Image: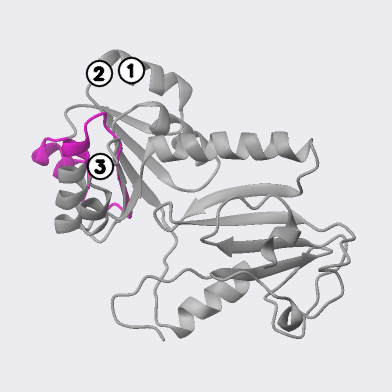
Amino acid sequence: QMQSGDKISIIAPPAESTEFFKQAGIINNTIKTAMFVGGGKITYYVAKLLENTKIQIKIIEQNVERCNELSELLPKAMIIHGDGSDQELLLQEGIRQTEAFASLTGFDEENIMLSLYAASQSKAKLITKVNKIAFENVINSMNLGSVIYPKLITSDSILQYVRAMQNSMGSNVETLYKIVANRAEALEFRVTNNPAIVGIPLEKLRLKDNLLVACINRNGKIRSPRGKDVIEAGDRVIIVTTTTGLNDLKDILK
């Protein structure tokens, strides 16, 4: 039973998730403008990914040499040389009008204060970079939008590399992501002809506790499985669980 204040995650095809948000009264407007404070590597790679979209990108960086580099690397972005913590500069550059704001400097305190200030001035979607994980619970309770922890991103990348190595030695985990503040895993398995699982209705499988068969991808068609559904060889299955160390689809069974 859901209660006020709960945080939930959903898995659905894009069209169905859009309809879900619409029915739930959640407005999810397309972002057209984004402001980044800090011109480091994360800013560069995110801006590069957005380069071919219609999003207007503005980056504020106080190092003039880095500004020149970014101007060459990101010709479609607007690069501003200035102090990103200067409130007058932020107002002048349109913090109240921007639809997304990312504080990505090298200082946690500055990033937190910038995001809190942006929240007080606009309705922009927020992204806040935090390097120290020690006060994660406190940070997650603040209005900082999507908080990214570079150390956790690095550990996820290492985990995915390890899983890839395991694949070459017989594991059938395709991808793995840590979710819910690192307290759960979402794993994608490719299904082989395993008689303990294949062809058996999910309701008859003795699944481990705190484990959900969240999605079945069969020939490119996504379905949210119910008790009568079965897993077939060749499927790709997404499992969400708080149990760590799953290397094979059969590990979902008790």
Q: Secondary structure at mark 2?
A: loop
Residue type at mark 2: give it. Asn
For the N terminus, the quadrant is bottom left
Identify the residue at image location x=43%, y=30%.
Answer: 44
| Disc number placed over residue 125 in the picture, else none | none
When asked about the image quadrant of residue 163, the answer is top right
Q: Residue 64 in the image: state x and y as whole percent.
A: 26, 16
Q: Residue furthest top?
A: 65
- Identify whether 225 is placed above or below 163: below
Earlier residue among tags 3 and 2:
2
Magenta span includes 91: yes
Region of the chain picked out in magenta, as a range: 85-111
Residue type at mark 1: give it. Arg
Drawn side of residue 239 relative to residue 156, left or right: right
Residue type at mark 3: give it. Ala
Earlier residue among tags 1 and 3:
1
When asked about the image quadrant of residue 105, the answer is top left
For marks 1 and 3, give the one nearer the viewer.
3
Q: Nearer the viewer, residue 12 or 80?
A: 12
Which residue was labeled with disc 1? 66
Which residue was labeled with disc 3? 134
When asked about the image quadrant of residue 29, the answer is bottom left
Q: Is residue 202 visible?
A: yes
Magenta span includes 249: no
Q: Nearer the viewer, residue 25 or 187?
A: 187
Q: Residue 72 in the image: state x and y as whole percent.
A: 44, 19
Drawn side of residue 210 relative to residue 8, left or right: right
Which residue was labeled with disc 2? 63
